[in-house]
Image (cartoon, rainbow, N blue to C red):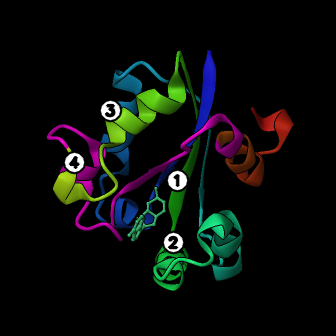
C-alpha cells in the first residue's frame, strides 16, 4: 500500500463539487486516511508550492490557492500516487481525458479542481506539510 497527498482546490469547493470528487475518490477504491477543510494563507500556499517559486505562474497560483477553502486529503491505495494522478487527468483540463477530475470539474490550467503528489518524496513532503503523524 502507498499513500499520496491530494487537494480538492478552492474552485471545486466554491463550485459545490467537493462531495462529488470525494465520492469518485472512494469509488475508485482509495481509503481516505486523513481529511480536513482549510483556508491557506498566501504564505502557506507559497510554502507548499515552493518548488514552483521561479515559475511565472507562482504568484497567480498562490493567490488562487489562498482565495478560499480547500480540502486536503491523505489517500491510501496500491500505487496510490499514479492511481490518483491518472484519476485527476492532465494538469490542463483541456488536455485531460473524459471522466477525469480535471476534465469534468476543472475550467483552466489555473483552476484545475485538484492537486496530487507526483512522486514518493513529494508525497512525503506534502503530507507532512498538512498532517501531523498522529493524525494519519
Ligand atoms: P498542481 O498540480 O496543483 O501543481 C501546480 C499548479 O500550477 C498546477 O496544478 C496548475 O494548476 C498550476 N499551473 C499554472 N500554469 C501552469 C503551467 N504552465 N504548468 C504547470 N502548472 C501550471
Residue drawn at x 65%, y 65% as measured from the top left: 51
Q: Which residues are magenta?
A: 97-122
Residues 16 and 25: in front is 25
Q: Which residue is mark 3?
A: 24
User: Is 100 included in the stretch rendered in magenta?
Assistant: yes
Q: Which residue is mark 4?
A: 96
Note whether 82 is above or below 68 in the view shown. Answer: above
For the residues labelled 1 and 3, the Cα–Cα distance comes to 15 Å
Q: Earlier in the sequence, mark 2 or mark 3?
A: 3
- Which of the two marks, 1 or 4, is nearer to us in this view? 4
User: Is label 2 within 8 A of ligand 1 (CB to nearest ligand atom)?
Assistant: yes
Instruction: Please indicate whether residue 86 sits to the left or right of residue 53 in the image.
Output: left
Determine contact: label 4, label 2, CB under 8 Å. no
Determine contact: label 2, label 3, CB under 8 Å. no
Residue extending furthest toward the left: 98
Q: Residues within 10 Å of mark 3 (few under 14, many from 20)?
A: some
For the residues labelled 4 and 2, the Cα–Cα distance comes to 21 Å
Q: Is residue 23 visible?
A: no
Q: x, y percentage for residue 85?
A: 41, 38
Q: Which residue is mark 2?
A: 65
Q: Earlier in the sequence, mark 4 or mark 3?
A: 3
For the residues labelled 1 and 4, the Cα–Cα distance comes to 22 Å
Q: Which residue is mark 1?
A: 71
For the residues labelled 1 and 2, the Cα–Cα distance comes to 11 Å
Note whether 19 is above or below 10 in the view shown. Answer: above
Instruction: Please indicate whether residue 131 sits to the left or right of residue 62 in the image.
Output: right
Q: Earlier in the sequence, mark 1 or mark 4?
A: 1
- Which of the two marks, 1 or 2, is nearer to us in this view? 2
Question: Quadrant location of ligand 1?
Answer: bottom left
Amino acid at each position: 500500500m502507498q499513500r499520496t497527498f491530494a487537494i480538492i482546490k478552492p474552485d471545486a469547493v466554491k463550485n459545490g463539487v467537493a462531495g462529488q470528487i470525494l465520492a469518485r475518490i472512494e469509488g475508485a477504491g482509495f481509503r481516505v486516511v486523513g481529511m480536513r477543510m482549510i483556508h491557506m494563507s498566501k504564505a502557506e500556499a507559497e510554502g507548499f508550492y515552493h518548488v514552483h517559486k521561479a515559475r511565472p505562474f507562482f504568484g497567480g497560483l498562490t493567490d488562487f490557492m489562498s482565495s478560499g477553502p480547500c480540502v486536503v486529503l491523505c489517500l491510501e491505495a496500491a500505487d496510490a500516487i499514479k492511481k490518483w494522478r491518472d484519476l485527476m487527468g492532465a494538469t490542463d483540463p483541456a488536455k485531460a481525458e473524459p471522466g477525469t477530475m480535471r476534465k469534468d470539474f476543472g475550467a483552466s490550467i489555473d483552476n484545475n479542481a485538484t492537486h496530487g503528489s507526483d512522486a514518493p518524496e513529494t508525497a512525503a513532503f506534502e503530507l507532512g506539510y498538512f498532517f501531523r503523524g498522529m493524525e494519519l
